[in-house]
Amino acid sequence: MQATQAPLPGSEIVLIGLITSAVVIAQATWPLVQHFEVMAHEGMHAVVGSFAGRTVTGIELDDKAGGGTGLVPDSGPGFLLAGFAGYLGPSAFGLLAARMIEFGHIIAVLWVTVLFLALLLIKLKPSFGRFTVPLAGILIALVLTHTSQIVEIRAAYAITWFLLLSAVRIVWYRATVTGAEDANILKGRTSVPKVAWFALWLCGTLTALVIGAHWMLFPVHPAVHAAPR
């Protein structure tokens, strides 16, 4: 694999984004793909909790596309920061992927995704995630080993769009339909209304979507116009 790859044409990047948007928005497909969104969500709880000095006791992913991350101690500013970070997790991972694409490290997005899934698997408790996380890794591995470079590049863009778009989708869904346990915890610990947390999450995810889209559409080396077929 070459260190860098040429970006796709802007029109194809937008098309992949529109297709991904349809998958994320449609009620028929969202319950399925939401399982992949929650991996990033719970993974970010664990990452921020670890950096904040908490011990990650385990991560659970259930068959309803929900989950939970155990952190000890479950109090203090570090715990609140980890609790807040969950809904920004897909956006953060999506921005990382978009940044890599901007600099031409497109296929590396797939390898980094597999690495993160492996780290997530290490912390998983016995739960439905023991099925979904390996499945996600296997699907990406199949793309890396049994498809052409152009398919790998398109897959990297699709994953990046999915992370950025699903972050907005889940925040809006939780805010308007079901609520969120993270918001309840943050309200209980800080007395800040849930609507304020949802507003912050929505602003953060929308901002990440705009920035990530810009990085993908306007790479650092615009002279390279299209990926090889």
Image: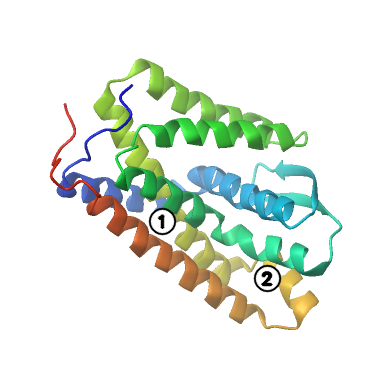
Q: Name the kind of residue labelled 2 in the image.
A: Ala
- Where is residue 77? Give x, y as percent: 76, 69
Query: What element does badge 2 sit on?
Result: helix
Q: What label sits on residue 78 in the rendered view?
A: none
Classed neighbour count for the residue bearing mark 1: other residues with Cα under 10 Å, few (<14), some (14–19), many (≥20)? many
Residue 23 screen position, x and y as percent? 38, 48
Residue in the image at 46% along x and 54% along y: 166
Q: In the image, what residue occupies the spot 28% across and 28% down?
A: 151
Question: Mark 1 near mark 2, Cβ–Cβ under 8 Å?
Answer: no
Here the colouring is: rainbow
Name the residue nearer the viewer: 214 or 51: 51
Q: Residues within 10 Å of mark 2 (few under 14, many from 20)?
A: many
On residue 165, which mark appears?
1
Q: Which residue is mark 2?
A: 183
**Front-lying residue, 21 or 3:** 3
Identify the residue at horizontal 53%, vertical 28% (top origin).
137
Q: Is residue 118 above or below residue 101?
A: above
Say which amino acid is labelled 1.
Answer: Leu
Marks 1/2: CA–CA distance:
20 Å
What is the x, y in percent for residue 93?
49, 49
The quadrant where residue 87 appears: bottom right
Residue 13, placed above or below residue 210:
above
Q: Is residue 211 above or below residue 159?
A: below
* Left or right: 185, with 204 as reference point: right
Q: Is residue 92 above or below residue 143?
A: below
Quadrant of the drawing holding the C terminus: top left
